[in-house]
Image: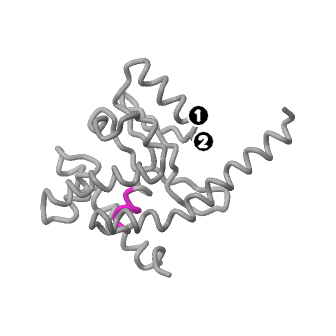
Amino acid sequence: MGRRIKHILAIAICLSLVAEIALSENIWTDVARKKDIDPYDLYAIALVESRRVWTDNQVRPWPYTLMIQGEKDASVFMPDRDSADALLRMLLDNGIKNVDVCCMQINLATHIERVGDPSELFNLRKCIEIGADILKIALRSTDDRELALGRYHHWRNEKISRNYGKKVIALAESLREAKIFED
């Protein structure tokens, strides 16, 4: 296959992803409504965890993000679902389970029981639903919004939790001011 055709195919894939995420704004509000959580908090977490600049120069969560935990944490933004799934399978086959997966960065070491097959997390709705479930648990753990939002990221260290919670709150408030989910 020629370079020009590969380039055109890559652009087509990126444009289809842009359309999927752009049209998925209703997924964020739909899942948030069903889970009784704030869609701005949910979306802000996804942005903090996996934001990328897309081909249309808009910043959105990237659905094919993997964070490999270890000595040097490394975020990997795969170009598509197949390549993300192949990398995830390779990691799991090599016994590496401390991996955060999808735009909500679901940690497999902690939450593997939430999915039958870890590659299901590359399904945007499934990823958001599981992230919302984890967020709901964190929100129920305390009346302190900053700490609760921070617990989505790190439960045991309050300083880390609060720093993360502050980022999410600031971003959620900016998103709310921009009215990204309003008609």
Q: Are marks 2 and 1 in contact (CB under 8 Å)?
A: yes
Please check the rendered image and state whether residue 71 is part of the magenta-colored stretch, yes or no. Answer: no
Residue shown at 27% from the left, 55% from the top: 135
Q: Of helix, strand and loop, which one carries label 1?
A: helix
Q: Of helix, strand and loop, which one carries label 2?
A: loop
Image side of residue 16 versus residue 2, left or right: left
Residue shown at 34% from the left, 61% from the top: 167
Q: Quadrant of residue 9?
A: top right
| Percent of width and height locating residue 150 | 25, 55
| Percent of width and height locating residue 160 | 24, 49
Question: Which circle marks residue 80 in the picture?
Answer: 2
Compute the Cα span from label 2 to label 1: 6 Å
**Residue extending farthest bottom:** 183
Question: Which circle marks residue 71 in the picture?
Answer: none
Image side of residue 152 versus residue 175, left or right: left
**Residue extending farthest left:** 142
Q: Quadrant of residue 10?
A: top right
Amino acid bearing label 2: Asp
Quadrant location, the N terminus: top right
Q: Quadrant of residue 116?
A: top left
Question: Which secondary structure is most common in the magenta stretch?
Answer: helix
Residue shown at 49% from the left, 23% from the top: 90
Q: Residues within 10 Å of mark 2 (few under 14, many from 20)?
A: some
21 above or below 13? Answer: below
| Percent of width and height locating residue 102 | 45, 45
Mark 1 lies on residue: 83
Amino acid bearing label 1: Ser
Please check the rendered image and state whether residue 43 is part of the magenta-colored stretch, yes or no. Answer: yes
129 above or below 118? Answer: below
Start and end of the magenta stretch? 40-45
**Residue extending farthest top:** 94
